[in-house]
Image (spheres, rainbow, N blue to C red):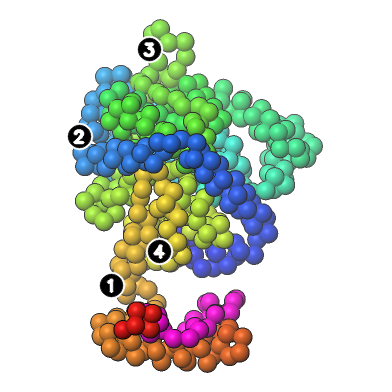
Amino acid sequence: MQVTSRKFKENAHEAMQDENLRAALGRVKEGFTAKRAEAAADLPEFEDLRDQARDIKDHVLENLDYYLEYFEKKVIEAGGVVHWCSNAKEAKETILKICRDVDAKTVTKGKSMITEEIGLNKFLESEGIEPIETDLGEYIIQLADEPPSHIIGPAVHKTKEQVTELFHEHHQQYGYTEREEDAEKLVGEARAVLRHKYVVADVGITGANFLVAETGSTAIVTNEGNGDLTQSLPKTHIAVASIEKVIPTLEDVSTVMRVLARSATGQEMSVYTTFSTGPKRSDDIDGPENFHVVLLDGGRSEMIGTELQELLRCIRCGACMNHCPVYHAVGGHSYGWVYPGPIGAALNPQMVGIEEARHLPNASSFCGRCEEVCPVRIPIPKILRHWREKAFEQQISPKPERWGIELWGFFAKRPWAYRLMTKVAVRVLGLMGGKNGKIKSLPMNNGWTAVRDLPAPQGATFMEQWKKQEGR
Ligand code: SF4
């Protein structure tokens, strides 16, 4: 996928003018957050489970090489093959080779953010293989030729009317000549079109929510059941997963799953949870004849042992974006790469480079809601601060911002000067606010005052008020 994180400001500006997007994002804001809150309140041990999930992921990250090798051993024992890929190019070439080996013309795909990350669809198309997304949201954005805008709701930015138009444009070839406006019937239409694709697909490609080390299984959770059909109908199943998805035992998986669905959609469990262990055995009724796991590093091992390691705990539930005021305002596409919202702002600078993603660490009000709701307690604001420091050190942040911080640093190191400066600033800003106490324009801060007034400070500085109150 083409990275446009550098244009975050332009992307965000455009998104905020988009009425359809405003309507669609309203649903994220209301729906997901209320459901998560209810689900958390209904489970007394929810906070304990979050601690346990965090500890499981931390333990794995401390012993990642051990669990990955153990997982590989178990996959081989079950008759599967593991392919180790250090980057997107290797992963795509590995998948292509597997497809070529079985002479694949069509592949069905279950929802997989990792294949978005490596840009698999475009690559397969360029090699003459037709990829068909089978998750409804992914299918919609594939028709629209757009990237996902949310981790668990890739087409959350689309209104029903836009989906009607998309289906009308693309489904006439299958005999659907009427514009369908009923949501349930639209789903039925997509289901009927996709069913045929499942039957003709030579290969099924899925992601994996978890890789279970003790059994060598891959696990996916879906609400549509498309993952099951994708991995069991074609003769070859390829599971693509990044290395941090490994979990030691099935019991650990069950602990993490208890916080995953509740944090994501407010469900106790997703509708379908499917474990795949090796290819079909002789007494199995169905299943693939070949089972491959493509394990992608993609820059993750470099994060181990650094300030960024905690990001690898992410289980891609989407709760941080559902609760983020910035995501609610600008939507997922503004972030310019596959991972949007707070997790994207924290992760993308590592994945695509801080130079390219330099605006993302600033796409935060630091309200802390992302950390508050993250089921594995990732300290996203702390990591955003890390990236801001990096941008400052590498002189990537704009000069006025750096000068401002340096000036602030000068005063902050000299308390007497700081007190004097704040005293003067409070008085000057108070005067600028005039009778109604609102500042309409402030040099170097017009990003704020261009669209809203800045309330002028009232009265004395904090220190002056503190002293007065304490009688010092
Ligand atoms: S950072 Fe936390 S809240 Fe955000 S997607 Fe990952 S696990 Fe979910």
Residue under label 1: 393
Gap between marks 2 and 4 measured at Cα: 33 Å
Q: Earlier along the polypeptide chain: callout 2 or callout 1? A: 2
State which quadrant residue 97 falls in: top left
For the residue labelled by badge 2, is the local secondary structure a helix, a strand or a loop?
A: helix
Quarter of the image where the C terminus is located? bottom left
- Residue contact between numbered discs 4 and 1, judged by CB atoms under 8 Å: no
Q: Nearer the viewer, residue 265 or 112?
A: 265
**Is residue 457 located in the magenta-colored stretch of the structure?**
yes
Q: As shown in the figure, which amino acid type bears the numbered disc 1?
A: Glu
Q: Earlier along the polypeptide chain: callout 1 or callout 3? A: 3
Q: Position of residue 219 (x, y in %)?
A: 40, 29
Residue under label 4: 361
Image position of 357 with respect to 249: above or below = below
Q: Nearer the viewer, residue 459 or 331?
A: 459
Q: As shown in the figure, which amino acid type bears the numbered disc 4?
A: Pro
Q: Is residue 21 left or right of residue 386?
A: right
- For the point 46% across and 91% down, the residue is 427
Magenta range is: 443-466
Q: As shown in the figure, which amino acid type bears the numbered disc 3?
A: Arg
- For the point 43% across and 89% down, the residue is 425
Image position of 118 with respect to 278: above or below = below
For the residue labelled by badge 3, is the local secondary structure a helix, a strand or a loop?
A: loop
Q: Earlier along the polypeptide chain: callout 2 or callout 4? A: 2
- Label 3 CA crowd tier, 10 Å (few <14, some 14–19, many 20+): some
For the residue labelled by badge 4, is the local secondary structure a helix, a strand or a loop?
A: helix
Q: Which mark is residue 281?
A: 3
Residue under label 2: 66
Q: As shown in the figure, which amino acid type bears the numbered disc 2?
A: Tyr
